[in-house]
Image: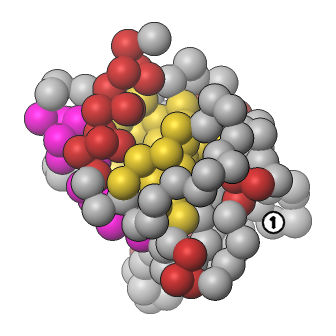
Amino acid sequence: MAPNIIGIAGWSGSGKTTLLEYLLPRLAARGLCVNVIKHSHHDLVLEAPQKDSARARAAGAVEVLVASPFRFALMHELRGAPEPTLAQHVSRMAPADLTLVEGYKWEPIPKIEVHRPSLEQPALYLDSPDIVVVASDVAAPDNLPQGLTWLDLNQPEQVLQWLLAYIEK
């Protein structure tokens, strides 16, 4: 797996995507190439069913690559095959300085937890040794596990600075 990979974990509505939207342009402005992998438990609808590429997939194609002068997308139908692992997805992507992964809570990769106690969901860091940073909108608890970094989610520059140091290691 890529050496500079870190997950962004947290409950729905915690602000994971908002944090990514803050981090990505600032990392790119520093000349860093950043990939993002987003896992969804839902089906992905990427194109209208009447489009040629969707029709080709419906007709039985396993992979359809749609290309334009602006971007390309590769759609792969699993057709009952097991879901690829995170490592397999990473290996298909172009090399990057950093790969940020949203979802894949169960994968043994270092993670930043976006934690908002107001959501009334349990903190993930309590049960996950892979969480190395918590970005939260509340102060760190007194019994914070040793080695866990606590950052202010309302000051996302702290997360950016932590990530930059992480990449340099």
Q: Nearer the viewer, residue 137 or 131?
A: 137
Q: Is residue 61 visible?
A: no
Q: Nearer the viewer, residue 23 or 81?
A: 23
Colour scheme of this structure image?
secondary structure
Give the magenta range: 15-29
Magenta stretch, main secondary structure, is helix
> Going 54% across and 31% down the picture, which residue do you hit?
5
Q: Quadrant of residue 62?
A: bottom right
What residue occupies the far left of the structure in this picture? 29
Query: In the displayed structure, does residue 163 sit left or right of residue 41?
Result: left
Q: Nearer the viewer, residue 144 or 28?
A: 144
Tell me where residue 99 appears, x and y as whole percent.
47, 35
What residue occupies the far front of the structure in this picture? 142
> Going 51% across and 72% down the picture, which residue do you hit?
116
Give above or below for 123 relative to 167: below
Residue at mark 1: 79
Tell me where residue 85 appears, x and y as whole percent.
76, 44
> Going 17% across and 41% down the picture, which residue do you hit?
26
Q: Is residue 32 visible?
A: yes
Query: In the displayed structure, does residue 39 sit left or right of residue 105?
Result: left
Going by the numbered disc 1, the residue's amino acid type is: Arg
Q: Residues within 10 Å of mark 1 (few under 14, many from 20)?
A: few
**Quadrant (top left, top right, bottom left, bottom right) of the N terminus:** top right
Q: Does 18 appear in magenta? A: yes
